[in-house]
Image (tube, helix red, strand yellow):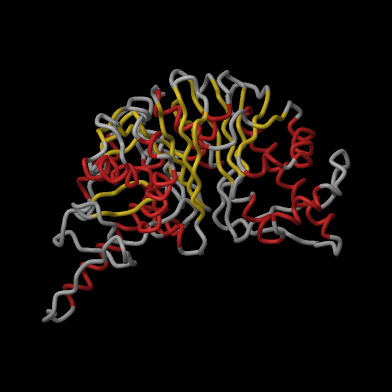
Amino acid sequence: MMISLGIDFGTSGARAVAIDATGETLAEAKHIFTGAELATAPAQWQTGLFCLLEQLPLELRQKIEAIAIDGTSSTVLLCDATGNPIVAPLLYNDDRGIAVMEELRAIAPPHHVAIGATSSLAKLLWWQKKAEGAEEAEEEKPRATNHQPLATSHSPDSRLPTPSQEEIYFLHQADWLSFLLHGQLGVSDYHNALKLGYDVEQLCYPDWLLKLLLKLPALPNLPQILAPGTPVGEVTAEVRSRFGLPQGCVVRAGTTDSIAAFLASGANSPGEAVTSLGSTLVLKLLSQTRVEDAQSGIYSHRLGDLWLTGGASNTGGAVLRHFFTDAELETLSGQIDPDRESLLDYYPLLKAGDRFPINDPHLPPRLEPRPENPVEFLHGLLESMARIEARGYQLLQQLGATPLRCVYTAGGGAKNAVWSQIRARHLGVPVAQSAHAEAAYGTALLAQISC
């Protein structure tokens, strides 16, 4: 019996789903990050990965033939030649890349998806500038008498090695986690690499990016890019021995968490879409045409012969959990009339800045006026997020995407029936829960077949 394992790393924790050849779920595992710092620490990612494997029954592990991993889009890190992270990762929503927007616009084509404060390429250029500054500062210092070792995976910090110190690799979260299993450093997939500037239509690094590499001596090694689902290599002997995996168990190139959620939904026809209601709000519409508009935070992933077009907003579940507990969300939602529109007009954000459908790193949160009645306040938040979602899909269609026919919902917010009814009222199309709630299920499908 063929068993495939999908592993999903999100902002609050990690999950694993094992399926057989028919798609039936055989086992699931979960690991929750319990501290604010845990989701940013590679050592904790590694702990989560290994905990997930250990939770699966040994009898099942011995039959796993393929594994794939997804991670949060544009969560990136730098590693040394042995794979040890040498700096703290920059997460998907880290916008310090705003400091290099002028340089980025000067080298990338107009409206390219990589032109964004949170893109992988913006973070890479930010690291590059920091490395150059560190090198200049080092030249001005008196020579030290004691050697200071670089940070390891157990203690990454904000320091950067200078180009002369060691070879450096630039990886996405899913790339590094997969490396822990197959041991091959510097391999990624074209879903994760899209915001790095990789050309997903021509399947190569574009000339403008290659020219950039020649001008930046401190630039880390960029990963080799494969199609999601492509076999990368077998799990190492050490991993196979530790977890009881079989000889020949292969690790495949992964994807991002939002695309994994799309794959799990059951959507497969143009016009079908998936909204992921997790910590953030992510829209993915399957389209016959590719849509790109960096000014609005819109980009398209390649999915076979079709395009998965959409964007990600910083609004979402993280805002709701800032004001309410899960129990309060359930109780208060039950007191909302979903057929009655709330007149409260919010733009719910925890801090300034959004990516889609308004791509503005300075966009201020709008959370006033706040009524005393928590039911009314929650109603206003849910209604406003539904407006943002509807605005996003409208914008995709205005720019040429296939017309929206239905929306599947993934993520924790999919369980809120009242919110789904509010969203359906704004979207004007049927809204249903995804066939499978866990993004890890979609990654397990990817482990079976490539996109």
The answer to whether one can see residue 229 in this image is: yes
Tell me if 197 is positioned left or right of 80 in this view: right
| For residue 329, above or below residue 181 | below
Hey, which quadrant is residue 129 in on the image? bottom left
Q: Find residue 282 and report its horizontal and vertical position in percent.
A: 58, 40
Q: Is residue 323 left or right of residue 288?
A: right
- Residue 267, how many percent across, how many down? 58, 24
Q: Quadrant of the C terminus?
A: top left
Q: Position of residue 317 (x, y in %)?
A: 64, 51
Count of numbered tags = 0
Residue at image position (18%, 77%) is: 140
Name the image quarter holding residue 5: top left
Q: Position of residue 122 (x, y in %)?
A: 39, 51
Quadrant of the frame with the N terminus: top left
- Horizontal side, residue 208 vs residue 423: left or right: left
Which one is in front, 257 or 289? 257
Q: Depth check: give the residue in front, 377 or 291.
A: 377
Residue 105 visible within the image: no
Q: Using residue 234 as the reference point, say whether residue 360 is left or right of it.
A: right
**Front residue (pair 371, 440):** 440
Point out the residue furthest to the front here: 59
Vertical comparison of 335 with 190: above or below:
below
**Residue 183 lies in quadrant:** top left
Tell me what residue is drawn at x 39 percent, y 23 percent: 2
